[in-house]
Amino acid sequence: MNENNIVKTTKFPSKPTWAALAAALCLAGCSMNPVKVTPEEVAQRVRSDQEQMYRDQVPVSGRISYSDALARALKYNLDYRLKMMETTLARGLLDVSAMDMLPKLVTEAGYNDRSNDSGGTSVGIEDRVISLRPSTSETRSHYYGRATLSWNALDFGISYFRAKQAGDEVNIADERRRKILQNIVQDVRNAYWRALGAQRLLADADQLATRIDDALGKSREAERAGVLPPTQGLSYQRALLDAMSLVNAKRQEMQFAKRELAALMSLPPGTEFTLVESTEDSLAPAAVDIDKLEIAALTNRPELREEDYKARIGVYETRKQIAALFPSLNLYAGARYDSNSYLYNSNWSDTGLNLSMDLFRLASIPAINRTNEARQKTDEARRQALAMAVLTQVRVSVERYKLAVVDQDLAAESSRVDQRLSSVSRAGASNRLESELESLRTDSRALVSRFQLATAYAATQAAYGRVLNSVGVDLLPDTVTGTDIPTLAKAIDASLLDGEKSVFLRPMGLQLASRPVSVRIADLPRGVNEAAVRSAVERIVVRNELVAGQGTDALVLTLSFQRMESKATMRAQWRMTLTDPAGKQLLQQNYVSFLPSEASDRSLGAFAEAATLSVIGDVRRAARTESTVAQQP
């Protein structure tokens, strides 16, 4: 027996060996050094990110409309993707919490080996005499297996409240997704209209830059040839450069919006795209029932709904703490197996029930009540502060929208005045440098005014979007996954109309479409090209957000030329009439001005532009409504 014991004990390392092994492991753990990421790993991560960011995107194949831009932003925006993933993660955590309420079935298997026999002797309590020789009931090596099904009532109650909290976390994640969605709509609206304004005016800005470059070249040649004094030539060049700098500043300011829009749509860098040209309809009037808007905001805003769910999570937390005070009731049943040959029964099953309770935890009841009361007051105070901020946002957004509409009207009027001034300047321009300089200055000022008008319209659109955002209206459909861009764009159009109906008296999308305007020129002097003059008028029509063309529903704008002779100059007028398709006269007005004695295509074209600009506001109203514009003398 002693020999067997010696054989058994030699299987295991001696104590010095164990000490040496432990020391080696300790030294190995203490010798770890920080390892930096290698350049190859960084490059691989960059390549992987670039592939993932733009993977599975539908290439841009045509012009992008406003609803198309929203569809792409909704489908491919990375921030929105992140919120969708967070919602999915919250749902997964809810499933995990629900599984915690199930009974626990624990299986266990193992192998046990001893270096010697287990066992013992019996000693008398009174006389301390050994009554049994040393004996064992367990083999040195044996296998065992267990399977236990248990259910704890306390664990079930706590898991139930945790699952309720996880369910509200899903709702919170969904409200945060809604907020990101609403912010995307607002950002796309802002960037889209600024980018569209820049796109409309880019060709005119390039054309004006070419004219200014030519004028700069002519002035430098005149300065070198001695035709102009140096001071006059440099002043002329300074004025031209100032005009071009002003135009470039406005153009660059609006062109940045195209890059912002590309980022919102998650387009790959360098992707070129063109926006759909659309008529700038008048936006809906500001809502007059502020109380109704405030109630809608308090009902719909994602932040307030999130606070509702947080308050409910707090209630469940209190209930969970109270449930932890109850006794723990545990029921279990299981099957057992042990290969120990000394056992009489190697297979058996057992069942049991135990009840336990931590009495000291009862002392925490007052603290739990105080904490619950403080939590409720904090949640209520936070929600009320947020509600006040929401109401303030609603009121401020409505006022900003009203001011933006006023600013847009002023910018439109300023643009029409500058365009008329430009037309009059070109009509009376001669071949002298001073005259050409004045023409270029007025043209650049008119172009800057058009940029300012486009900026003002984009600001009005942004203010309009802020009102919708402040109310918390969902302007996009909830179902997105698996939807192609055209179908999603149509769903967005319908959702936009439904959302705007709840905020404004007339949704923007329900504005009446603009009817085309057909331009006719009559009674021109001999030698003047009628097509050139008509083209100048049509250009003004298009610049002012109208459609120039033919059609059964087109309005007819007729300009009849009449001359009034004088000694040095020619005094002339345009007689303008606007009629509907049935021939009913909607507008009649005269525009009188002075022209050079010899009329040309350029002078009469500019004269016709100025005359058209004097009535363009009335023409726009007639093209957008069914009402008749009053006749003006």
Image (cartoon, rainbow, N blue to C red):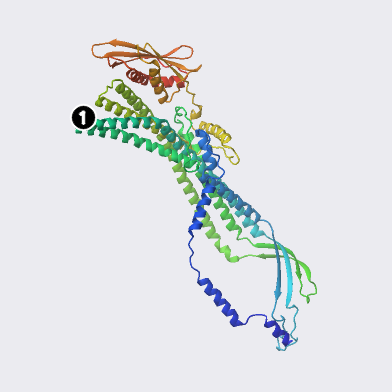
Q: Indicate whether 504 appears above or below 27.
A: above
Q: Amino acid at mark 1?
A: Leu
Residue depicted at 72% across the width and 81% down the height: 119
Q: Secondary structure at mark 1?
A: loop
The residue lying furthest to the front in this view is 225
Q: Indicate whether 245 appears above or below 540.
A: below
The answer to which quarter of the image holds residue 519 is top left
Residues 513 and 572: in front is: 572
Residues 431 and 285: in front is: 431
Q: Quadrant of the N terminus?
A: bottom right
Give coordinates of residue 283: x percent, y percent. Answer: 45, 29
The reply to whether residue 507 is in sight is no
Give coordinates of residue 494: x percent, y percent. Answer: 55, 32
The residue identified by callout 1 is: 228
Give coordinates of residue 628: x percent, y percent. Answer: 44, 16
Q: Quadrant of the C terminus?
A: top left
